[in-house]
Image: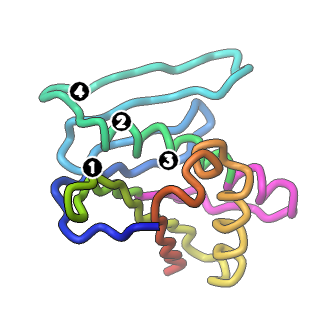
């Protein structure tokens, strides 16, 4: 897998879990989306701060983070681990270049205050195993994982 030599742009999102769906927020306020999961009786689709236009990297980060934070919740439920109310996932998607090739890379920052670092690391890694977005890009782009428990 090729590594990015020069980052051209980074799209960032901050996603929190809630009972009404996952909310992704762009780092500069250009992407506020409230998403629902399939089968949710009360879907909440809210696009609040779209302008100026979000980038493809922000949209990808937002969709991936909503899927991923749901996967974290599923893994935690399966393992009988209660997640903190302030669980969040920040994803940064870089568009970059190596030579003439354009590439993507991702950085995940999973915050689960109050849980043991090893527990959150195991949850975060297991979530990548079941998240469809993570599976789709596995082996195609570099993904770095950072776990924060404080």
Instruction: Name the residue rendered at 59%, 51% in the picture.
Output: 134
- In the rendered image, which residue does mark 2 sit on? 59
Question: Horizontal and vertical percent for residue 57?
Answer: 31, 43
Judged by depth in the image, the label closer to the viewer, 4 or 2, is 2
The residue that label 3 is drawn on is 65
Q: Residue 69 bears which disc, if any?
A: none
Q: Are marks 4 and 2 in contact (CB under 8 Å)?
A: no
Q: Position of residue 116 (x, y in %)?
A: 67, 82
Work out how far the residue at label 1 is from the one at label 2, CA to CA, in angstroms.
8 Å
> Element type at marker 4?
loop
User: Total number of numbered labels?
Assistant: 4
Residue 136: horizontal and vertical position, in percent?
60, 45
* Residue farthest along the left direction in this orientation: 52
The part of the image, by quadrant, that contains residue 5 is bottom left
**C-beta proximity under 8 Å, tags 1 and 2:** yes
- First reached walking from the N terminus: tag 3 or tag 2: 2
Asked whether 101 falls inside the magenta stretch, the response is no
**Dot 3 alpha-carbon crowd within 10 angstroms: few under 14, some 14 to 19, many 20 or more:** many
- Alpha carbons under labels 1 and 4: distance apart: 14 Å
Given residues 72 and 58, the one toward you in this image is 58
Element assignment for label 2: helix
Q: CA distance from mark 3 to mark 2?
A: 10 Å
Residue pointed to by mark 1: 11
Dot placed on the residue nearer the N-terminal end, 4 or 2: 4
Q: Which span of residues is magenta-colored?
A: 72-90
Position of 89 relative to 70 (above/below): below
Q: CA distance from mark 4 to mark 2?
A: 10 Å
Q: Which quadrant of the view contains residue 115?
A: bottom right
Q: Determine whether, in the image, residue 147 is placed left or right of residue 127.
A: left
Give the labeled residue for mark 4: 50
Pointer 3 or 4: first along the chain: 4
Q: Residue at x 29, y 67 (%)?
A: 4
């Amino acid at each position: 897998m090729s590594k990015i030599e020069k980052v051209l742009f980074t799209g960032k999102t901050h996603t929190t879990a809630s009972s009404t769906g996952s909310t992704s927020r762009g780092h500069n306020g250009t992407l506020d989306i409230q998403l629902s999961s399939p089968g949710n009786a009360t879907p909440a689709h809210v696009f609040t701060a779209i302008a100026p236009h979000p980038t493809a990297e922000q949209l990808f980060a937002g969709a991936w983070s909503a899927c991923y934070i749901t996967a974290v919740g599923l893994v935690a439920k399966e393992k009988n681990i209660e997640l903190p109310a302030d669980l969040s996932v920040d994803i940064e998607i870089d568009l970059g270049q190596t030579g003439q090739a354009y590439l993507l890379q991702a950085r995940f920052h999973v915050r689960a205050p109050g849980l043991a670092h090893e527990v959150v690391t195991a949850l975060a890694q297991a979530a990548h195993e079941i998240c469809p977005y993570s599976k789709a890009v596995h082996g195609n782009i570099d993904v770095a994982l950072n776990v924060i428990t404080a």
